[in-house]
Each structure stands twice: as structure tokens, then as C-alpha cells.
Amino acid sequence: MRILIPKEVADRETRVALVPESVGRLVKAGQEVMVEAGAGERAMFLDQAYADLGAKIVSDVKSAYAQADVVLKVRAPMPHPTAGAHEADLLREGCVLIGFLDPTRNAELVQRLAERKVAAFAMEAVPRISRAQNMDALSSMATVAGYKATLIGALALGKFFPLLMTAAGTIPPSKVFVLGAGVAGLTVIGTARRLGAVVEAFDVRPAVKQEVESLGATFVGLPMEEAEAVAEGGYAKELSKERHEQELKLIADRLPSMDLVITSAMIPGKPAPRLISEAMVKTMRPGSVIVDMAAETGGNCELTEPDQVKTAHGVIIHGPIGLPGQLPVHASQMYSRNVAALLKHLTTKEGTLNLDFADEITRGACVTRDAVAAPAAGKAS
């Protein structure tokens, strides 16, 4: 089986689908691995590291695509800047593609892949079940993003995070408010606590209260039933108008006392919920900071501008995008392990492809197969 790791062509994408460690394991298992020259450079993994572990470094990307039985990517295929074609059209008919494919917002790509009879698997569609934990790339990237968002907030805030006893007197700790206690939010909590901040966290899901408190933060939430707040896969549900108004009031009451607010509330397949209005921002302390991790899907704050830093009413508002790519070494290592685990699941012990669509993981992650869009193409990503 020939496996290709191409260089990512998306703007500012620094990650690579497989790091040398994972490539070495595949080569030892008897697989032929092709790595496009420079594929790992932006993540600090040089061609020689891949070659030393048995990979073949290739420079003719069109030829490599034409030979590959399996193509492993980070981002969804897009027009290639030098090959003169769309990456989806470079794929060999009938091959396997694995990556973040964003199928719910990328209908044209899904159609292209179906026409090429590609068996495409979206990492974001891997079912969140215990058997697939080591394939959960969404959680891996959320961990990276949460850590980086906390550092962005700490650098932007003109204050220390921890309590300090100094010759100039006692300096109180900063107060951090986290909106959304999923994987990203919990990472924010843990990171902010390790830096010494006092942390509060809001979430609509009652079940996360114990996790928030186990990290040393105070849980802020509405009295709600689990069925009212939790959707399939453990994600937060879109609330009723009445409940949404209640959560906005609860958040608004906490903002004036906070130094840093980090938002990570997202609803799969839908725009991010609006949790901080301009009127709320006006109540915040001058010099306080908002880091909106949901900037790419519309933002949790009304004033967020994607990929921009702005000051409004004395509050510094960050709208970072591509947070995992800002820590490319560990982001690539974690993603690589997730991708390698899914690939292992899709192959036999002898190293040949075995696409068993009766299996929940294989079926759930599949976007296209046999020249048609699979059910996963309509799932929330």
C-alpha cells in the first residue's frame, strides 16, 4: 500500500498529517510511504528525519498523487498553487483520503470526491465513542487551541496572573472567565490555573460542573436538565430563546469583575452562539481582554473580527483563527497519532485496506464512497 503525505497548501497552515515517528511505524509494518519535499518543514520536521525512517521524499506531487492508494492530509483538498489542478482532481480514482474535510460546509468538494470515487474519511466525523478515543482529532486540536488562547490572553493582559507578595505590596491574582467547558475550555481552565489565575467557567451542560471544579475553577451555570442542554456526541445544544436570555444575563453579571474572558462556545454545524453583546463589553474594566476562540464560526462576542485584534470601549478583543497551527510541533504530533490510529482501523493486520462499512467508526467517518456522498457528509462537523 502506497501512502502519501503531501505538503499542505492552505494559507498559513503549518501542520503536517504525519510526523516522522508515525511514518517510521508504517514503514516497519511494511507500508511504502511517500512524503512530499518540505511537507513537515513548517512544523520543524525536516525531510531528512522522514528519510532516515524509511520514507521516500518526492518532489513531483502530481505523480505522487497518481500513485497513492492512501492520501493523508490536515486540511481539505483545495486548488493546488503549482500543480495546475484541484487537489481532489489529483487523487487517484478509488483511493482513500483522510483529513479534516469540513463536509457540511463543503458540498462542492464532497461532489468532487464522489465523482473521483474516492473513499473519503473526515477526522471531524469520527464518532465520539470509547473505541475511537485515540482517533479524536477534534479533541486533540481543541487542547492545543485552548492552551494557545490562554497564552494569548495572558500576554495581552497588562497584569500578572498569579497572586504575588512583593516589596511594593500584595498584587491580587487576575480573574479569568471561561465560556464553554468542552475540551478547549477545560484546557483553558487548567492552563490559567497553572499560571495562578482565579478562574470561573460557564457552560449550559450540568455534567461538566464536576470537571470544572476538579481543575480548581468555580462553575457558573443555569439549573437545567441534561436533555435540555446536551446534544448527540456530548456537545452543547442550541437553547430556547428563554434559556438563551437567562444565560446572557448570567454572563453579563460576571463580566464587570473579570480581567480576561476566553470564549470557546460552539455548536457543531451552526454559527457560534452570541454570548457577549457590545453592551456587555461596555461594562467591562478598561484594559480587560477577550479572546474569542469561536472567531472562525462567527464569534461568541458581537465585536469580534476574525484574525484581528481591536480595542473597543477600552477592552482588547482578539479574534484568533488557526490556533492549532500556532503550535505546529505538538499539534502535528497529536494529529498524526489520531490519523495513524484511524488508518490502522481501516487496514488489516497484513496492512491492506479493509473498509468495513458495517463498523460504526468506518461508517461514521466516511464522507464519500462508491461514487456517492455517504451519510457523514451531512453530519455536523
Image (cartoon, grey):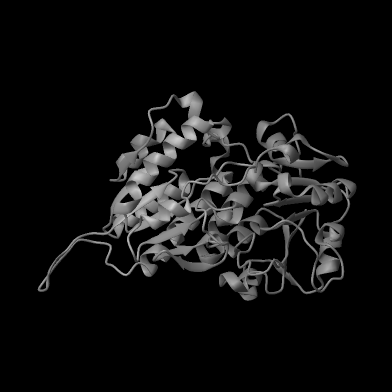
Residue 76 position within the rendered picture, expressed as x and y whole percent measured from the top left = 72, 56
Residue visible at 81% across and 58% down in the picture: 68
Asked where in the image residue 154 lies, by quadrant, the reply is: bottom left
Quick check: 309 above or below 149? below
Residue 228 can be seen in this image: yes
Q: Position of residue 189 (x, y in %)?
A: 36, 50
- Pinpoint residue 67: horizontal percent, then vertical percent: 85, 60
- Residue 298 drawn above or below residue 374: below
| Residue that appears at 63% across and 51% down | 339
Q: Nearer the viewer, residue 260 or 69?
A: 260
Marks counted in the figure total: 0
User: In the picture provided, is 329 more to the left or to the right than 33?
Assistant: left
Residue 372, image x and y in percent? 86, 39
Q: Nearer the viewer, residue 116 or 142?
A: 142
Q: Is residue 203 visible?
A: no
Quarter of the rendering occupied by the C terminus: top right
Relative placement, left or right, of 15 versus 264 is right
Taking the spot 33% from the left edge, 40% from the top edge, the residue there is 219
